[in-house]
């Protein structure tokens, strides 16, 4: 196998990485006994990003400066995000130059790509520390229903994080790999994937080594967040009934309500009733109440109903009936909600599978796919589909499909274009993706300008435009003038994504920080190593006192103190030097300890009855 | 019979050489039947077609070329796209018939827009009738129409499929091609009528 | 492709929708279809002294087909039969900025004009024959 390619589940609420370990097989990447999950939450602290748990802890002190659910914004324009959803976010949004959404933080504005890149960096760095190797390539998962713009944006985020997204993999498909390979299943399976902010349903046919997606459907703006919002709505009503003057629209209040809602949702996954108390720091009231599963049910039902409609659409697209299915697999954090399981079970008429932890299964599948891409195995093949039709605008703003939804990837479509005016050298094409009849209901992927068409009489040039969609569901367009066999050049004007120039600029800016970032990472790594070394010495100190001369013991003690001081410092190189010095001083101790260990092992063997 | 551009051995599929495992760039241009090493005939064993599709996909898919050179990866992408399109077309009974007409087009004169006599007049009359029913929102009459059209479509499809299966020669004569093409053309008009029956509004399909 | 106001107008409010009595000797009827998509188009012209004085159409098809036939009826009005015969589908494509997947709609419109003129001329022949024989 060549270079390692890890799998990263970049989630709305949580992110994590997995890889295939020699001998062990696929595993999530975590410190022993620790969670692999990094919450997809960020904040700025003294000009530096804090990601994950640290940011989550600060979110209540600093609600307007805490970013969450960024995945709901990636590859979108501000006007596509409904006003009520914008109002629910504690942070501010504004519109960028081409209408793309920007997130305001500390008087700065960031694209969702930049913010997602920070989450990816956090995942990457931690994986690097644990694996003890640098990572450059990854398989990154996205909702199956993500369109081209959202996929490109995710890939750009990876680039900004210093990762090449070798493959953008669909989340339900990733889950199917982990699940299908684990059990070596055959037949028709449905993967129901309800995450924090997105829903996907994928139907797969498993035949031998082939994992073929037959149909996929979903909603990129539907998930556990909506459960929380429904509970927030109910809590708001309750509080307002009790305290008419309660101010619940402030960012802090929203943050408190959101977190209480989440606690209630999680609590009711384990019991039938949960008590809660809500108070907001700068307000005098305090509200106490309880929530039961019976009260929760009607709040969740409309959201779950929407997912089941999508399931029916997918079945229709595949030409399958519920009875045709051999298995239904649940994926995503929101499927632990009992009401979701109950309704899914009712819809599909069978008990859904939850063999693999729904929090980990997507990352595991991505890790396995990464292993395959790196050349580590080739005993399975994933054939995925394009989730939404791709086409061009025609007269009256109607959408003319060139590639239909659920076409197996990679695929391509060719169209011949010509000029309408003598000596015309450029043609413009607007490309859209979606399932509706009118382009205004579809997403504009961009405007493609074909240039460099040889000057000829109108109608003479034959420009063959090829629309290629790769295995990642990402479109590229190329053009050839058939008469002269010259390539027409294509200028792509993305609508909501980043231009090449913008990516380059951001990358350049990040190189400036790269040294700083590298220092920070090294410092973390060295501190962890130092911690382990110091603990090791303490553990064996009794041996040291017996084996070593007094003067050596004192020298070690002094050096340990120096290392401790440097662990508080900011220079990894100084820490490293002091640790090396400590290493030199303890070499004879290490030898003695190893000797003792061998000796005791030998004694153990002697005393063990044969 | 096509040969491998590397080892010169005969090729089973025009996309990939089973003997020396090399991708065949010439496969980007070949017809869908030779992608699977099949003669251009209508009767295809779908089970074995699917098996060949899976076997070839497992050799050509770009996921197995992630560490290869850029040129090789591109080629694998192009060939996989070709393979997917070939499978998509040949596994569908109507698309396969239409594709065959395209293959024969180079050898026989075309009848691209030919229809049975009086068919177009009938279609126009039926469309006008439908328009009235749609405007009146007469669901019951619409359902009857839908059933009629469906029956007619099934009969039509069955008829040309039978003709194609019973065809002996590899390149049929003009009369035969004309007959099939007329039916394939008529099929599209019938599909259009069916579509309109099930559309709930009287608005014309955009 | 940005569509001109005029085109969107043709699409939203097609001109000259309807029919003339087929039996009218002054009328020529063209009925054509596009097997690519199953569209059907009927275009009729009313002729006085070799000049098209009015035109009507009825199209069952997509927006591009409707816009193409609407435009065709506007264009033929006031033209002589020979002038109308000279209308090319590429002119319709240009006027409506039709993309390649919709070019067959313009072909349909051109064919409909030709078929209507042919029908009119045939009727004239037969009617003049019948007058001659009478």
Image (cartoon, coloured by chain):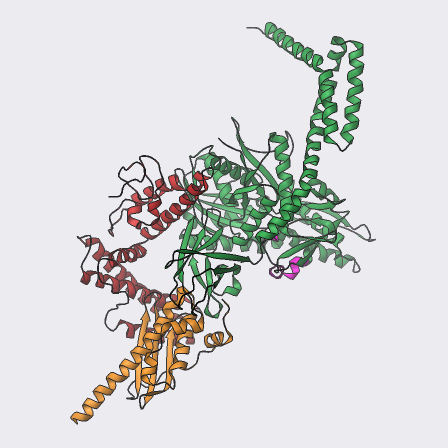
Chain colours: A green, B red, C orange
Q: Quadrant of residue A418?
A: bottom left
**Region of the chain picked out in magenta, as a range:** A72-86
Using the image as rendered, state which of residue C128 and residue A466 is in the foreground: A466
> Residue shown at 28%/47% (left/top)?
B34
Image coordinates for residue A216, horizontal then vertical, percent: 47, 51
Q: Please identify the residue farthest to the left as the structure is shown.
A: C133
Left-right relation of A508 to A21: right
Q: Please identify the residue farthest to the bottom as the structure is shown.
A: C134
Using the image as rendered, state which of residue B187 and residue A265 is in the foreground: B187
Image coordinates for residue B38, horizontal then vertical, percent: 26, 46
> Residue shown at 73%/22% (left/top)?
A534
Q: Quadrant of residue A546?
A: top right
Image coordinates for residue A133, horizontal then vertical, percent: 59, 31
Q: Is residue B141 visible?
A: no
Left-right relation of A267 to A400: right
In this rendering, the answer to whether B138 lies above or below A545 is below
What count of labels does the image hold? 0
Q: Is residue A177 visible?
A: yes
The quadrant in which the C terminus of chain A is found is top right
Magenta stretch holds residue A553: no
């Amino acid at each position: 196998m060549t270079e390692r390619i890890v799998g990263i589940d970049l989630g709305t609420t949580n992110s994590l990485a997995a890889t295939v370990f020699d001998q062990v097989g696929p595993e999530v990447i975590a410190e022993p006994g620790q969670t692999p999950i990094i919450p997809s939450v960020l904040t700025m602290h003294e000009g530096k990003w804090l990601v994950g748990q640290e940011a989550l802890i600060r979110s209540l002190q600093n609600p307007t400066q805490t970013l969450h659910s960024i995945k709901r914004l990636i590859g979108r324009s501000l006007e596509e995000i409904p006003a009520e959803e914008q109002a629910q976010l504690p942070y501010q949004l504004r519109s960028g130059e081409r209408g793309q959404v920007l997130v305001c933080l500390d008087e700065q504005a960031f694209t969702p790509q930049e913010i997602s890149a920070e989450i990816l960096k956090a995942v990457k760095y931690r994986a690097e520390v644990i694996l003890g190797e640098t990572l450059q390539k990854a398989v990154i998962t996205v909702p199956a229903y993500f369109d081209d713009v959202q996929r490109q944006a995710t890939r750009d985020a990876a680039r900004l994080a210093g990762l090449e997204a070798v493959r953008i993999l669909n989340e339900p498909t990733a889950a199917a790999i982990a699940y299908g390979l684990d059990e070596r299943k055959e037949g028709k399976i449905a993967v129901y994937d309800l995450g924090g902010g997105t829903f996907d349903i994928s139907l797969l046919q498993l035949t031998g080594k082939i994992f073929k997606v037959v149909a996929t459907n979903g909603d990129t703006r539907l998930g556990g967040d909506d459960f929380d919002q429904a509970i927030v709505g109910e809590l708001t009503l309750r509080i307002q009934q009790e305290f008419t003057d309660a101010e619940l629209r402030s960012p802090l209040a929203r943050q408190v309500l959101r977190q209480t809602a989440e606690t209630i949702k999680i609590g009711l996954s384990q019991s039938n009733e949960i008590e809660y108390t809500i108070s907001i720091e700068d307000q005098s009231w305090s509200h106490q109440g309880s929530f039961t599963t019976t009260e929760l049910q009607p709040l969740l039902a409309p959201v779950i109903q929407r997912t089941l409609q999508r399931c029916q659409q997918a079945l229709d697209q595949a030409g399958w009936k519920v009875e045709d299915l051999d298995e239904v697999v649940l994926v995503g954090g929101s499927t632990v909600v009992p009401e979701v399981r109950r309704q899914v079970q009712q819809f599909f008429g069978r008990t859904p599978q939850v063999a693999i932890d729904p929090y980990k299964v997507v990352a595991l599948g991505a890790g396995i796919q990464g292993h395959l891409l790196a050349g580590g195995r080739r005993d399975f093949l994933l054939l995925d589909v394009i989730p939404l039709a791709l086409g061009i605008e025609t007269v009256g703003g109607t959408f003319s499909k060139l590639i239909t939804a659920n076409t197996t990837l990679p695929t391509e479509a060719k169209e011949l274009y010509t000029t309408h005016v003598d000596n015309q050298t450029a043609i413009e094409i607007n490309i859209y993706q979606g399932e509706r009849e009118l382009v205004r209901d579809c997403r504009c992927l961009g405007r493609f300008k074909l240039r460099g068409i040889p000057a000829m009489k109108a109608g003479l040039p034959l420009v063959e435009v090829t629309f290629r969609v790769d295995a990642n569901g990402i479109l590229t367009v190329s053009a050839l003038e058939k008469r002269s066999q010259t390539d027409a050049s294509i200028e792509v004007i993305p609508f909501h994504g980043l231009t090449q120039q913008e990516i380059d600029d951001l990358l350049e800016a990040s190189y400036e920080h790269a040294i700083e970032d590298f220092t920070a990472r090294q410092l973390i790594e060295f501190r962890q190593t130092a911690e382990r070394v110091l603990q090791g010495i303490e553990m064996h100190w009794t041996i040291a006192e017996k084996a070593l001369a007094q003067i050596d013991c004192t020298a070690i003690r002094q050096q340990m103190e120096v290392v401790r001081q440097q662990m508080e410092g900011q220079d990894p190189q100084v820490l490293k030097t002091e640790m090396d010095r400590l290493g030199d001083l303890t070499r004879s101790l290490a030898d003695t300890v190893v000797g003792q260990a061998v000796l005791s092992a030998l004694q153990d063997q002697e005393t063990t009855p044969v | 019979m096509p040969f491998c551009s590397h080892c010169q051995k005969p090729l089973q599929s025009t996309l990939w050489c089973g003997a020396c495992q090399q991708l065949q760039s010439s496969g980007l241009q070949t017809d869908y039947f030779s992608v699977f090493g099949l003669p251009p005939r209508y009767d295809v064993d779908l089970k074995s077609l699917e098996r060949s599709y899976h076997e070839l996909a497992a050799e050509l898919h770009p996921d197995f070329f992630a560490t290869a050179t850029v040129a090789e990866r591109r080629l694998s992408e192009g060939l996989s796209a070709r393979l997917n399109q070939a499978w998509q077309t040949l596994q569908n009974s109507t698309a396969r018939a239409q594709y065959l007409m395209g293959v024969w087009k180079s050898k026989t004169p075309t009848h691209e827009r030919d229809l049975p006599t009086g068919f177009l007049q009938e279609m126009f009359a039926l469309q006008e009738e439908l328009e009235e029913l749609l405007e009146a929102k007469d669901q019951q009459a619409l359902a009857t129409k839908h059933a009629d059209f469906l029956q007619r479509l099934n009969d039509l499809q069955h008829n040309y499929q039978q003709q194609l299966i019973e065809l002996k020669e590899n390149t049929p004569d003009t009369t035969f091609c004309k007959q099939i093409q007329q039916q394939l053309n008529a099929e599209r008009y019938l599909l259009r009528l069916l579509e309109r029956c099930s559309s709930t509004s009287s608005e014309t399909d955009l | 492709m940005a569509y001109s106001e005029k085109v969107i107008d043709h699409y939203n409010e097609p001109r000259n929708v309807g029919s003339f009595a087929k039996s009218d000797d002054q009328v020529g009827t063209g009925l054509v279809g596009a097997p690519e998509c199953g569209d059907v188009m009927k275009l009729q012209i009313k002729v006085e002294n070799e000049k098209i004085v009015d035109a009507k159409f009825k199209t069952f098809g997509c927006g591009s087909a409707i816009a193409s036939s609407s435009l065709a009826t506007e264009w033929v009005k006031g033209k002589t039969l020979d002038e109308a015969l000279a209308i090319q589908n590429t002119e319709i494509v240009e006027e409506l900025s039709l993309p390649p997947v919709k070019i067959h709609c313009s072909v349909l419109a051109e064919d409909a004009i030709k078929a209507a003129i042919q029908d009119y001329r045939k009727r004239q022949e037969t009617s003049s024959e019948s007058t001659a024989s009478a």
